[in-house]
Amino acid sequence: MTVPLIATNILTLKYYIQKIIIRGKGDFMNYGITEKLIKNNRPGEKLFPRGVVVHSTDNKGATAENHYNYWNNNACAKSSAHYVIDWKSIIRLIPENEIAWHAGKLTNQRFIGIEICEPFNGETGKFIEAWKRAVWLTASLCIKYNWTTVNNVYSHYGVSRIFRESNHTDPYGYFARFYKSWNIFLYEVDTEIINQETLKKR
């Protein structure tokens, strides 16, 4: 039987809400960060971050290590990010107090950039692992800088609309391919913030 797309989205939303509630009772995420600072595609300018911008790579199958190698070895790329995340790792490429080239000039001067790697279609397990790491990292940054998802967490699509420096719409299309949405991402980040704050009090 073919399930209508809207029904599938509703079922998926219910499933993840249940998972969030269960996780809120004590199943806390915890991921390590590997620092591998790139030597190229770093302007060396100071950044006083006001928030975070979440991107997706639009490079199906390429890992965080692949993107590290590309940005580290290709001086002409003229693009970069502070973090790149895949289904196995989180790599810090540029310090948070230094500008990265992940969007237009105004965005780069204000925000930390996170790139989420994209698995091939149908690789749902890899998507979920990358998604969880992105949720965890975004929540961790919000706690570190006393940010909120309402005021400080943006998609590339969001800053494109605000600053009019590009026409990028990521990570909307990537999330939709795996029956997720930007609103669900923000909801899970908010939940993870609560979980991490609760863990600190124990």
Image (cartoon, rainbow, N blue to C red):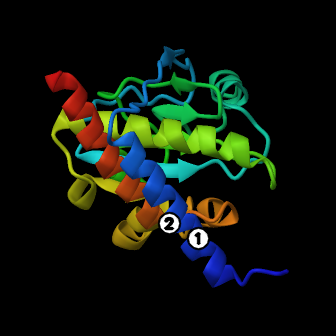
> Does residue 111 appear anywhere in the picture?
no
Q: Which residue is drawn at 28% across and 47% down?
A: 51
Q: Quadrant of the N terminus?
A: bottom right
Q: Which mark is residue 43?
A: none
Residue under the point 28% across and 30% down: 46
- Left or right: residue 85 versus residue 199 is right
Kindly identify which residue carries mark 1.
11
* Residue position for label 2: 14
Residue in the foreground of this view, choosing between 161 and 35:
35
Examine the rendered structure and indicate whether residue 118 appears above or below residue 63: below
- Identify which residue, 61 or 131, lies in the foreground: 131
* Residue 104 locus on image (x, y percent): 44, 55
Q: What element carries label 2?
A: helix
Q: Which of 179 and 24 is in front in this view?
A: 24
Which residue appears at 44% of the width and 36% of the height?
100
Q: In the rendered view, would you say 94 is above or below 136?
A: above
**Dot 1, crowdedness within 10 Å: few (<14), some or many (≥20)?**
few
- Name the kind of residue labelled 2 in the image: Lys
Residue sticking out furthest to the right: 1
Residue 6 visible here: yes
Quadrant of image for the C terminus:
top left
99 is higher (above) or lower (below) than 123: above
The answer to whether residue 102 is left or right of residue 106 is: right
The picture quadrant where one finds residue 192 is top left
Location of residue 76 (image quadrant)? top right
Left or right: 42 as drawn, with respect to 191: right
Amino acid of disc 1: Leu
Task: Check if mark 1's residue and mark 2's residue have beta carbons within 8 Å.
Answer: yes
Disc 1 from disc 2: Cα separation: 5 Å
Name the secondary structure under disc 1: helix
Which residue is painted at 60% across and 39% down in the image?
A: 130
